[in-house]
Amino acid sequence: SLQFAKKFLPIASRKCSTRLPQVCAGQPARLFASGSSGAADDLEKLSPEELRKLVKDLRSQAPKSTDPKAPQPADAATTRAALSGTKGDASDSKNITIVELQRLRDRKQPITMVTAYDFPSAVHVDMAGVDVILVGDSVGMVVLGHDTTLPVTFDDILHHCKAVSRGAQRPLLVGDMPFGSYEVSPHQAQHNAYRLLKEGGMEAVKVEGADPWRLRTVETLVRGGIAVMGHIGLTPQSYSTLGGFRAQGRHAKQALELIEQAKRLEQAGVFAMVIECVPPEVAKVLTESVSVPTIGIGAGPHTSGQVLVYHDLLGIMHHPHHAKVTPKFCKQYSSVGASINQALREYVQEVRSGAFPGPQFSPYTMVSGEIETFRKGVEAMRAAPPKPADAGGA
């Protein structure tokens, strides 16, 4: 703030002295008098509150460039914050790490997590102030058109991780380990997880299940310096062995086992865990039984946070396939798909009727005087006899 005030004080002195208000208790008003040689030194004497008021006025009076190509004073981060409705609080502007996530859990401040699969969705999720982005293997169902997540390959996930990491700055970035990318051995899991971090730009990975083999894999990854998010309850990669997408923990024995799984995952070193399709009572006891954040999806209100799929919560798709794979627990916060469909229909109609592009969207003109030369050239070209075809090697 002090550097900004010193930079724009001469401008204010020359151009704004008659318009700037008396910003703080009369003292800084003399700073705007023409020829005040001690203005910059006087700034040092202002209190932080006085300086903030002064800078606010200077910003409002600073000259603005009329050149649309000229660099603007606000940087990208400021622009993103201005567009977001949640960036005003200081805590919201922090880059989220696993340490900050734990603090949110300890303060009982609900954690938000949303999936994203490309640059635009990552930008939107980031600007909304979401805490965690999951590049989930659900990409297979909502982007690639599969009925399950099983066909998703490691290269699929890596590709989408790269795009998301370019679009998100504040949220913690978690990459899903897809089916077949970590089950063969802990060494395979470690190799692929490193790639998600080094090539994909992720900061953590997510692994489904809590059987002894996967617990060993989690331990190996954590010992290797990789942050791991667990996932229990309904684990979509176990679609075949579960007999479909079925809620878990509905019977007492299975519910108690889920709590034990959560404890074992915490012991293995996960920094958080997803709890999917579990009765709220079970999710509540499970959350109370561990000291790391729990992120619920279809698990009621008692977890440390919530996660939803980007396409589901925005209502992006209106298609029989998507209706088939959209879960019952998903709340639709918008109907983006309806707006997209309407816009595309209008585009098709305008192209076919000739309304688009029209003069407004045909902005390029020939250099002055060239149009007549061009027209004469076209007439000459049309009047000339056709050239014989090149016989070539025939």
Image: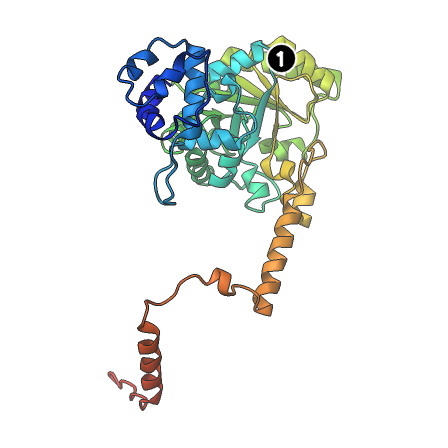
Question: Camera-side residue: 293 or 86?
Answer: 86
Q: Quadrant of residue 165?
A: top left
Q: In percent of the image, x 26 and y 86: which residue is there?
A: 391
- The correct choice, above or below, for 4 with respect to 246 in the image is above
| Residue 116, percent from left and from top | 53, 35
Q: In percent of the image, x 40 and y 11: which residue is there?
A: 27
| Residue type, mark 1 in image | Glu
Q: For the image shown, how many numbered marks are present on the structure?
A: 1
Query: Is 344 positioned to the left or the right of 64 in the image?
Result: right
Q: Quadrant of the C terminus?
A: bottom left
User: Would residue 311 be seen by someone viewing this image from the given angle?
Assistant: yes
Q: Secondary structure at mark 1?
A: helix
Question: Camera-side residue: 39 or 271?
Answer: 39
| Residue 320, percent from left and from top | 69, 49
- The correct choice, above or below, for 218 with respect to 353 in the image is above
Look at mark 1 in the image and give the residue it sits on: 260
Given the current orientation, which residue lies at the most extreme bottom position? Answer: 385
- The colour scheme used to paint the residues is rainbow
Question: Camera-side residue: 41 or 93?
Answer: 41
Q: Quadrant of residue 201?
A: top left
- The correct choice, above or below, for 191 with respect to 270 in the image is below
| Residue 173, percent from left and from top | 47, 27
